[in-house]
Every structure is written in C-alpha cells, then in structure tokens.
Image (cartoon, grey):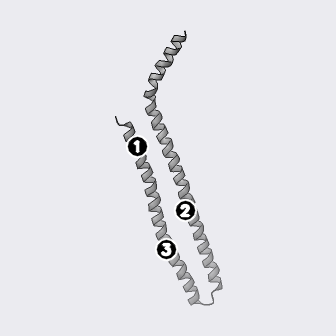
C-alpha cells in the first residue's frame, strides 16, 4: 500500500512541471499587476499634489485681486497667475508623457519576459 502511495506521488510530481508553465505565467501576471498598481499609486499621488497646487494658485489669485487698488495692479497679478498656469500646463504635458512611458515600459518588459520564458 505504501508503494502505491509513493508511486502515485511520483506520478503526480512528474506531471507538475506541465502545470508549472501556467503557474509561471500567473506569477508573472501577478508581479506585473503589483508593479502597475504601485506605479498608478505613485502617479495618482503626484497628480493629487498637482491639483492641490493649482487650487492654491487660484485661491492666491483671488486673495491678491481683492487687495489690488487699480486695474493695472489687477492685470499684473492676473498676468503672473496665467504665466504660472502656462508653465504648469507644460509640466503637466511632460508628466503625462513620462507617466504613460513608464507604464508602457513596464508592460512591454513583462511581455518580453513572457515571450522569452515561454520560448523553447
């Protein structure tokens, strides 16, 4: 009876490598998902900070406009704010490009590793 049990274990251990490929793919998918979630969390935090800085900028503009004494001062304050907003927009574009590139690289790397792992 012990021999039958040992024989069954040996037979099942011989078939396990066949299932290993699926397990490797599942592990790779889980690792990619973890990397992407970490990247998304980091990206989301950066964008949240960005939104908060814009809210502060517009709030500061409102405060400054209430203390201006004439139209030329108000125009100067508003012009500075718009200039800052334009700089922020340029930074947003760069950040968006970098964020997309980072995610694309993670996915591409994972797909390349998957192909090499599955290759004979």
Q: Residue at x 46, y 70 (%)?
A: 90
On the picture, is 100 further left or further right than 120? Answer: right
For mark 2, does the 10 Å Cα neighbourhood hold few (<14), some (14 to 19), or many (20 or more) residues?
some
SS category of the residue bearing label 3: helix
Name the residue tied to disc 3.
Answer: 87
Judge by depth and name the residue closer to the eye, 20 or 43: 20
The residue positioned 52% from the left and 78% from the top of the image is: 82
Circle 1 or circle 2, nearest the eye = 1
Instruction: Give the labeled residue for mark 1.
Output: 113
Q: Nearer the viewer, residue 87 or 116?
A: 116
Q: Residue at x 63, y 82 (%)?
A: 64
The CA distance from mark 1 to mark 2 is 30 Å
Question: Furthest residue to the left?
Answer: 120
On screen, 44 above or below 109? below
Q: Residue 71's spot in the image, x, y percent?
A: 58, 89
Give the answer, above or below, for where 54 lies relative to 115.
below
Above or below, comparing residue 3 to residue 114 in the picture: above
Q: Assess disc 3: are there few (<14), some (14-19) or many (≥20) residues with their C-alpha within 10 Å of its C-alpha.
A: few
Q: Are there few (<14), some (14-19), or many (20+) residues within 10 Å of tag 1?
A: few
Q: Which mark is residue 40?
A: none
Viewer-proximal residue among 77 and 35: 35
In the rendered image, the quadrant that contains the C terminus is top left
How far apart are the two marked residues, 3 and 2, measured between alpha carbons?
Answer: 15 Å
Q: Which of the 4 quarters of the picture holds residue 50? A: bottom right
**Cα distance, mark 1 to mark 3?**
39 Å
* Label annotation for residue 47: 2
């Amino acid at each position: 009876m012990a021999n039958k049990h040992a024989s069954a274990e040996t037979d099942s251990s011989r078939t396990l490598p066949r299932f290993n490929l699926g397990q490797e793919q599942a592990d790779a998918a889980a690792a990619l998902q973890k990397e992407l979630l970490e990247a998304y969390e980091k990206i989301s935090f950066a964008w949240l900070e960005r939104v908060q800085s814009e809210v502060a900028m517009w709030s500061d503009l409102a405060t400054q406009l209430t203390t201006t004494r004439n139209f030329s001062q108000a125009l100067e304050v508003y012009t500075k704010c718009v200039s800052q907003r334009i700089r922020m927009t340029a930074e947003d574009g760069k950040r968006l490009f970098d964020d997309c590139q980072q995610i694309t690289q993670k996915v591409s790397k994972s797909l390349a590793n998957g192909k090499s792992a599955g290759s004979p």
